[in-house]
Amino acid sequence: MPVDCAFQTTIERISILDEHGVYDEQLGEGLIPDSDVVALYRHMTMCRHFDEIAFKLQRSGRMGTYPQNKGQEAASLGAAYALEDKDWLVTCYRENAGLFWRGVDPEKILLHWMGDERGNHIPVRATPLAIPIGTQMLHATGLAWASKYRGDGGIGCTFFGDGATSEGDFHEAMNFAANLDLPVVFVCQNNSWAISVPTRIQCSAPTIAQRGLAYGMHSVQVDGNDIFAMVKVVREAAERARCDNRPTFIEAVTYRLGDHTTADDASRYRDPEELKLWEARDPMIRLRNWLEQRDLWDENQEQAQRIENEAIVSGIVKRAEEIEPPTTNDIFNWMYAETPKVLETQRKTMRTSSLGQGFDGV
Amino acid sequence: MAMKQPDNRSHFLLPDLGEGVAEAELIDWKVSPGDTVVEHQTLAEMETDKARVEVPSPWAGVVKDLNGTAGDIILVGDILVTYDISGAAATPSAPTTVAAEPVTEDAGTVVGNVSETLSMPSSFQRNPEPATREDDGCRSMATPAVRRIAKDLKVDINSVAASGRGGRVTASDVNAHATPPVAAQPLAQATQPTENELPLATRVAQPIEGVAERIPFRGIRRKIAQALQHSVQTAVHFTVVDEVDVTELDRRRKGFEELLGRRLSLLPFIMTAVCRALREHPAINATVDDFVEEIQIRSVINLGCAVDTDHGLMVPVLKNADDLSIVQMADRVREVAKGCQDRSIEREDLTGGTFTVSNVGSYGGQFATPIINYPEVAILAIGRARERVLTKNGAFYAGLVLPLSLSCDHRVVDGAEGARFLNTILRSLEAPEKLLPAV
């Protein structure tokens, strides 16, 4: 035969609780205990309320730019639930739900967007938010490499958007992870839009998961608005990383229901019909219906939760706004565990230069 | 960057609603004076350069006064809403000197509170206000811009009678209060901003009677106004006009219609002739970049086509128009015109033109002095074709005459070149056998 097939494969798409509320009992068997599903739902509602308030803080001049997380809560939350505390969460800026689940103080996120360096002081295994697109994927590969070297059993799990997969950093991180057998889980939150650029314009392949396949790693597409499916694929990926030191690429298909950030107006480039379609696929609605069908949740609990969320979030805002003023030292304090020499020099120079005098007195 | 709002919550300064936004247009108020609002409740809908947004209240309170009406441009740092703090909600501490300063000056320079005792380099210290005030309670309300004017005119703003909204001192109040400048004071005049330099939000309209409606320049109207003003102020316009006998062209057009079984106007024929002429006269198919002072002869022909829409004049662009057949041209014109009308047109179809045609004749009128769609260097206005008595070789005959008006940027196109270009179009339209496949 003159023509042989050199390679052939398929990309699986995993969905357990679909947008119509149909639940795959077989795939979902024993996946998450009911009490945990309730906890995850409650957490999701709190995150949604936090998101709404954070947005308004920017609009009333109380905070800088803020990127809404609305609609993407299930992806990072499902992953954080499936991972262990020793695993690294290396996120960009639409993973509040996962970070809060891990134990990052929500006021740290507000402080970050208020331009306060103390927002980057995160004592759990999560990195500060990465605003430049794609840089954090390399950090995840590096952290996973370190974990493998030290044998601490931890893995790296990084989040990024569809737009980031067109960045060079993405390909470098993937290449190292695949070829050095590193325990990394790459989670692409494909939310259809890289700011105003639709996915189809910057990726000619029908799935983004194919990009992972090209590096020889297990690649899968998952309904990113389905928390059950997220838990399942991340759990499998984590096991693959922990036991076999093999990375996984997960394309979580989701949708950004808000604007890119508070400096954006998606209504100028997005079809309102598309938005309507995805509003119906909201991960929170679907989860609530699932709980109500099983008598695990009702309207009274929903009302009580709403009141609780308001109290929680206003407490978070209060703590972030009433913190004592920062000092210039904070610029140097929260990026590295051990301050590099060059930063130490800068810190000293700042203290003795005329410009710095008086400003470091706090 | 978070904005420092007054500690006593007496007023809410318009924050930066995006990233580096300087001003926003007030679209609509969502509250009224006297309303009790809760924290995060929407006060107003506003539009920045980039987005239409809802502005929420940063705290709970009673709205005292709304500063501005729909259509006003409000500067970031100006007071948007004042709150009634006479009740229990009033701040426990008396306003300090720092808080009583125009607060916007603090925005973005220092994060957190600056203690009075902190030693700062002199360059960072603000000049204390002259201590002429009797007490802080009598201080006038005014925007920083108006305060600046008062300062320049050496007017104590607290002694000026206020006529603005909510008892604000306006620029006019300050000017009226100032000693009329005499000729011997050229310095004072030099530092006083001219009317056009004042921020829009502080300007006051001249009193005029008999106004049925006041329509602020905004949205597309403002963009049109700015574009046309820029063109007229930059390009040196001259217009050359001529008429062309399109009897034969019209006959062929009708034959074409019959053959294809569809309606076709003269427009796509004229546009095709324009494309041919642009190929022969590349200097007309050009744009100018005034920043680097350069004329750019363009290799592609992107034909702009002025369209009158419900929301104003728009100029969609037919890319590579010289590649289009007559029928394709007609279809594209219809397509982009519809796109303009229902606003579904893509942004890229509104930019990148190298020459524009404007079919003024469809609304009547013969000749025009069209304004160039800057940075292009020429524009052709097509008048209404009418039947007229013509002569040829000493005999009368009835024919269809099309008036054409060509405006060029004289900085780039000489009069002779413009006339030659128009002539090429005329010849092409008079001898349609070269323009069209035989029917």
Image (cartoon, helix red, strand yellow):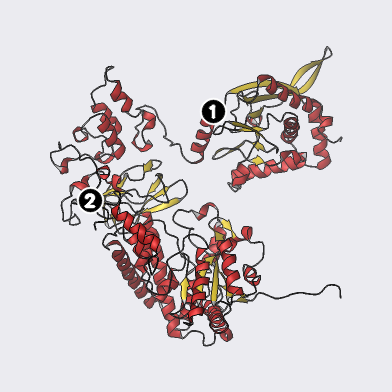
- First reached walking from the N terminus: tag 1 or tag 2: 2
Image position of B362 (left or right of B210) = right
Figure label count: 2
Residue B339 spot, x, y in % from top left: 62, 46
Quadrant location, the N terminus of chain A: bottom right
- The alpha-carbon separation of the residues under discs 1 and 2 comes to 50 Å
- View extreme (top): residue: B394
Q: Residues within 10 Å of mark 1 (few under 14, many from 20)?
A: some
Image position of A177 (left or right of B60) = right
Is label 1 on the same chain as label 2?
Answer: yes
Which chain hosts label 2? B
Q: Residue at x 34, y 68 (%)?
A: A313
Residue A227 spot, x, y in % from top left: 51, 76
1 or 2: mark nearer the eye: 1
B71 or B226: nearer the eye? B226
Residue B371 appears in the rendering? yes
Residue B196: name its quadrant: top left
Q: Image height check: is A268 above or below B75?
A: below
Residue A250 spot, x, y in % from top left: 57, 73
The amino acid beneath tag 2 is: Asp
Residue A162 appears in the rendering? no
Q: Residue at x 34, y 32 (%)?
A: B204
Q: Which residue is mark 1?
A: B234
SS for dot 2:
loop
Quadrant location, the C terminus of chain A: bottom left
Q: Image height check: is A19 above or below A55?
A: below
Q: Which residue is mark 2?
A: B84
SS for dot 1:
helix
- View extreme (bottom): residue: A30
